[in-house]
Amino acid sequence: MIKSLHISNYAIIQELEIQFSKGLTIMTGETGAGKSIVLGALGLIMGKRADTKSLFREDRKCIVEAIFDITEYDLQEFFEEHDIDFEEETVIRREITPSGKSRAFVNDTPVNLKLVQQLSGSLVDLHQQFDTMDIHDVSFQLRMVDALADNGKILDNYKQVFRTYRQNQITLSKLLRQSEQATKESDFLSFQLNELSEASLEEGEQSKIEAALSKLNNAEAIKKKFSASFQALNENEHSVVNQLNAIILSLNQIRKQHPELEEVISKFEGLTLEIEEVANEFEHIANDTEYNPEQIEEFQSRLDLLYRLQHKHQVTDIAQLISIQESIAQKLDSYADLSEEIASIEKAILQQEKELYAIAETLSERRKQVIEPFQKKVHKLLGQLSMQHARIKVDIHESDGLLATGKDIVEFLFAPNKGSRFLSIKDVASGGELSRLTLCVKSLVASSIPLPTLIFDEIDSGVSGDVALKMGKILSKLSREHQVAVITHSPQVASKADVHYFIYKKVIQDNTYTKVRQLSEEERIKAIATMLSQSPPSDHAIANAKELLALN
């Protein structure tokens, strides 16, 4: 509920504050006194666009601030989601600077207008003639029918199943797209996998083949070089090994006469043996190296295959080809798993669909049971408000498929006059008719549905006397369930106030200001009497005013 509204430097308001009653707050005043300006300021709190033309003094900023008690609105999650401090007494503030910059705050946290609109929409329901009201909204109409049918718990259960059902439908759609794509790709991927599998790829194989092929292509030169090297080292008459052996033989002649040469001669003998071994290896290599055209062709064919596969898959080595092979195999395996997953989800969807239709049928039956009594009560209230021939019809029919709220499409149709066709409310109801219809409908669901603060502007337009008195009674009854504020010209409605504010203009030093004051009991009598007659009011009007107040 709204606790207070503070307005500073707005239009012809220099400074004022209104404290709202928990029940019915009434605001009256002469035409042009500034009642619409108060609503304009409240509109800023509800996220409407600001204009520097609204500034009372152009060198100062405008501030409009409202304090709300949001204890019963279950908005903690909203505050957490938007990273705003949650306070049971929440402050929404709008500021307009002389430069035209507009800022919004919730509990001193800067926010954008969209967030202000979302939050204030849960806190204030502002009804002005010719405004688009939520009674136009078919989703709100259904919400009211469900409230009357006490469908809350059943609907919560339905919505929980429906969320899972819709998520499964989305998942199934995704899987079917993947399956369709898999069908298109699987043949091509299978061909690629077979090609790679048949290649029997081994990591490191390519470098080994390249080395072997290089050896085979140079076999003659290798054989010739190693053979010549062997000859020079150990085969020729003057080979290196023969010359070294001759040196060893010569040194052996002085070995005993020069004992300290023993170590160096032994090293020389070892070196000679190593050279001889190297010569033997050269001979072995020369003997083993043969030019083999068949093997060259085999190696070259293998390399050509590896090079072709690498070029095809745009990689540079066998390790990457093996990785691609594994990836293709996994993808094909996943395609194979899709059919099982699709079948499982389709089965779950069918089970959920069956469950949803059963719950939806229960919801539908309960809705249909309350429609006729609801229509009769609305007709009775409309008759009390001088709309004896107006009729409302709750049209309910089955949708083509399951909806988030069941299988029903609900729409309120309205016929304002005898013989009129039933049409959508938004297409046929005038501003005054719409205000009265809204009052009747919301007064009937007030105890069943959480409503924000209801603010009515000129809801009593065009009615007076006994009709206005009955409207006041309906508003008073509604205010016992929800906070209600009404701007009115009707003394009968004003007499039902829990708190009565008088809005007026005052001229101070050639400037006109809008002021507001809460009326005492005596002041209320005079204000209502003035509304009944003239200013100053007659004794008869004062007596009538006292009589109206005594009816409460």
Image (cartoon, rainbow, N blue to C red):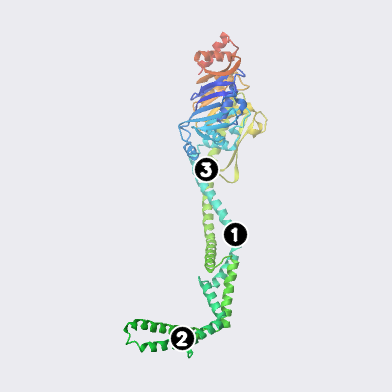
Question: Residue 50 location, x and y as percent?
Answer: 60, 30
Q: Residue at x 56, y 21 (%)?
A: 14
SS of the residue under disc 1? helix
Q: Closer to the N terminus: mark 2 or mark 1?
A: 1
Pointer 1: residues within 10 angstroms few (<14), some, or many (20+)?
Answer: few
**First reached walking from the N terminus: tag 1 or tag 3:** 1
Nearest to the observer: residue 369 or residue 104:
104
Q: CA gap, disc 2 to disc 1? A: 75 Å
Quadrant of the image occupied by residue 139: top right
Q: Residues within 10 Å of mark 3 (few under 14, many from 20)?
A: some
Vertical arrangement, residue 30 with respect to residue 130, above or below: above
Residue type beneath disc 1: Gln
| Residue at the spot of label 1 | 181
The mark lying in front, picked from 1 and 3, is 1
| Quadrant in the rendering for residue 405 | top right
**Would residue 89 appear left or right of 487 to someone viewing this image?**
left
How packed is label 2: few (under 14 Cα within 10 Å), some, or many (20 or more)? many
- Closer to us: mark 3 or mark 2? 2
Query: Is residue 482 visible to the viewer in this orientation of the structure?
Result: no
Which is nearer the eye, 434 or 87? 87
Residue where numbered disc 2 is placed: 240
Name which residue lies at 52% across and 14% down. 523
Q: Position of residue 66 (x, y in %)?
A: 51, 27
User: What residue is pinned by disc 3?
Assistant: 362
Amino acid type, mark 2: Val
